Amino acid sequence: MSILRTEHLSYVYSQGTPFEKIAIEDVNIDIEEGEFVGVIGHTGSGKSTLIQHFNGLLRPTSGKIFVDGQDIWANPKEIRKFRFMVGLVFQYPEYQLFEETVYKDIAFGPTNMGLTPDEIDRRVKEAARFVGLSPIQLEKSPFELSGGQKRRVAIAGVLAMQPKVLVLDEPTAGLDPKGRDSILSQIKEYHQENGTTVLLVSHSMEDVAQYAQKALVMNNAKVFLHDDVEKVFSHAAEMEAMGLSIPQVSRIFLDLAGRGYPVTPNVFTVEGAKQEILRVLGKGGSAHA
Amino acid sequence: MEQDVILLADHISFHYFDDNERPIPVLKDLSLTVNRGEFVAVLGHNGSGKSTLAKHFNAILLPETGNCIVDGINTREENRLYDIRQRVGMVFQNPDNQIVATIVEEDVAFALENMGVSPAEIRKRVDDALKSVGMYEFREHAPHQLSGGQKQRVAIAGVIAMRPDCIVLDEPTAMLDPRGRWEVMRTIRQLNREFGITVVLITHYMDEAAQCDRVVVMDDGKILFNAAPKEVFSHVKALHAVGLDVPQAAQLADELIELGYSLPPDVISEEECADALAALLDGAGIHPQHQA
């Protein structure tokens, strides 16, 4: 079932001024409920502008957005409803914390939704558990925590609203490899346990390859590709030409395929690369050296 | 040779305090030497002590025990602080926190004005510094009009204008997109190769570390590895154990070696990996088919 759909969506910044700039143009995408979609594109490709339309932070210059089948701008007074349905985690969300305690910060969204105190309490604890925050940390000031922990608090605050669609803009920027893997694994787990649709904006195709099922590639304000990860990554050479950094193993296999070796260039994880080499070697007959 | 050493950490220890005033050791009897003209990467997960170490190199922090010597000057010599800071410049993660002026060239001139350099000399040094980071055409722009990578290069120019012997960069590319990262890395490499500036690069990106002369891996306030990238990245499991990645090329080679295939043990770059895989395929009788 379609959970998020756009129809001829376009957005122009500073329309009618000398600074007019088309940020997204005629975007038509359809995202099914429960999908995990990686959103890729270099700076200025329009991906941030696009995601800000999903919960009505930006109003399209033209075109429509449907969340769970409803045109979100059909009645502008009801836009708030869609803000709870589509949760947006911005870049560097740790700078947006403001409450006295971690608990209160996570409770902010659910409180605004008008939920009962019991339900708020349940959701705060549940969200904290998902991002790995301990009960002791819940009583601390968010400003006593490390950068990585603060980011978890910010993500928990959005999870606690239990949105149908969770959109994360570069949630691992600036984290070390361990912090990155742990946050992405928690998001994946949350996705699997709750069936929440996830859109992960990332510069790292390695991360998209590892965690997402589908990928949406933006280029020059338009959708360049929107398909299964395998199919999208089979365009690795084109994406590289676009200025996107493709995984190192993809470049290695493009190189091998270019030299004429019978390998597929559509490799994007170390595991996939290993399997491909084993497959080709298996064909060749003599296995172990 | 003694005079070739520009940075020396000699058995330094340092601790912070937690909320309950209990000491948390960050550097534990750590020793490290950086030679003039070297390009050294420092890796380590968050909390391993790498930023704390970096701050010792231009006397932002002083060791509790041991000594930190910069170009022969002990960082404890308070009256030589300017000499130390002029020799070792620092660049931090967030470009927006480092830019103070409203015009690019004024920002680059900021430290020089404070140092009392003559106006004619300032003009020359600012122009040279902006040219060396490829930002000369943007000298009259406002910093907010620049991309993250461009801002970071302006921050580097501000340091270069002081004509330092060494620059210490603390995750300068962490907040940048791939293009910005590429621009900044190219600039740093160029400063090292063409101007002989010693570079200490603290990073989480293994591909950046792979481009350096030497890689220092920190864990728990100590040095775990200190060797050429090829040597360090061959320790795939030990690096994973301390929360670090290795380049995919090294990991793939390592996994195939584990399965009993014969590949060189020191593959870290894409080209080396492709060559090694090509040799492996050739060895198994699978050769290029030139139909395309």
Image (cartoon, helix red, strand yellow):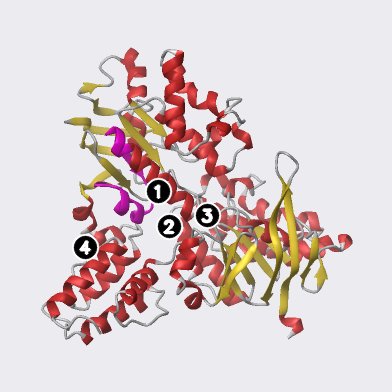
Badge 2 crowding class, 10 Å Cα cut-off, few under 14, some 14 to 19, many 20 or more, is: some
Q: Nearer the viewer, residue A163 or A129?
A: A129
Q: Position of residue A35 (x, y in %)?
A: 24, 39
Which of the two marks, 2 or 3, is nearer to us in this view? 2
Q: Are marks 4 and 2 on the same chain?
A: no
Residue B142 visible to an observer of this rendering: no
Mark 3: secondary structure: helix
Does the residue at mark 1 contact the one at mark 2 (Cβ under 8 Å)?
Answer: yes
For the point 34% across and 12% down, the residue is A77
Q: Which mark is residue A58?
A: none
Chain under callout 2: B
**Residue that numbered label 4 is attached to:** A266
Extreme residue in the left direction: B291
Residue type of the residue flagged with mark 3:
Gln
Does the residue at mark 3 contact the one at mark 1 (Cβ under 8 Å)?
Answer: no
Mark 1: secondary structure: loop
* Vertical placement of residue A7 versus B288, above or below: above
Does the residue at mark 4 contact the one at mark 2 (Cβ under 8 Å)?
Answer: no
Q: Are marks 2 and 3 on the same chain?
A: yes
Mark 2: secondary structure: helix
For the point 75% across and 69% down, the residue is B11
Q: Position of residue A25 (x, y in %)?
A: 26, 38
Extreme residue in the right direction: B79
Mark 4: secondary structure: loop
**Residue that numbered label 3 is attached to:** B150
**Residue that numbered label 2 is attached to:** B179
Residue type of the residue flagged with mark 1:
Thr
For the point 41% across and 16% down, the residue is A113
Residue A33 visible to an observer of this rendering: yes
**Residue that numbered label 1 is attached to:** A43
The segment highlighted magenta reads A191-215
